[in-house]
Image (cartoon, rainbow, N blue to C red):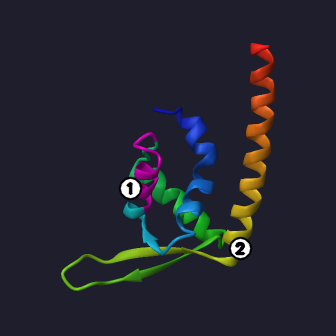
């Protein structure tokens, strides 16, 4: 529904927001984003996992492999203290950006 560029620019913040809750594996993260957005945000699995790997490399999230009987092995991700700090910064920046865009867009309607 939204352009790939718009989603790409906010994907890290969205994933970090989901991981404020309990640890989730990649599929759960994608489904949570889809559910919370009313189906307006969908991400390809390959895109989601590449962002998760990048965020783990930056130490914003931490993955832990879990094997449950009768299920395949899955990596559950959780937010790290560094990830919480980044999320807070990104939220502030996002709020400022949205406010600025609304100022500009609102000028055209005046």
Between label 2 and label 1, give the one nearer the viewer.
1
Mark 2 lies on a secondary structure that is helix
Magenta highlight on residue 77: no
Q: Using residue 103 as the reference point, say whether residue 7 is left or right of it.
A: left
Determine which quarter of the picture holds residue 69. bottom left
Identified at 36% across, 75% down, the residue is 74
On-image quarter of the C terminus? top right
Query: Can you say whether 41 is above or below 45 in the image?
Result: above
Q: What numbered label is drawn on residue 86?
A: none
Magenta-colored span: 29-40
Nearest to the observer: residue 83 or residue 96: 96
Query: Can you say whether 73 is above or below 83 in the image?
Result: below
User: In this figure, which residue is indicated by the disc labeled 1?
Assistant: 31
Nearest to the observer: residue 2 or residue 65: 2
Mark 1 lies on a secondary structure that is helix
Total marks shown come to 2
Whole-Å distance between the Cαs marked 2 and 1?
A: 24 Å
Magenta highlight on residue 34: yes
């Amino acid at each position: 529904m939204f352009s790939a560029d718009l989603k790409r620019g906010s994907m890290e913040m969205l994933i970090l927001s989901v991981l404020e809750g309990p640890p989730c594996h990649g599929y759960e993260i994608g489904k949570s984003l889809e559910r919370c957005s009313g189906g307006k945000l969908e991400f390809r699995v390959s895109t989601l996992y590449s962002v998760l790997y990048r965020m783990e490399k930056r130490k914003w999230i931490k993955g832990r492999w879990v094997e449950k009987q009768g299920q395949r092995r899955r990596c559950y991700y959780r937010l790290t203290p560094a990830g919480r700090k980044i999320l807070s910064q990104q939220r502030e920046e996002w709020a400022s950006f949205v406010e600025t865009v609304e100022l500009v867009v609102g000028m055209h309607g005046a």
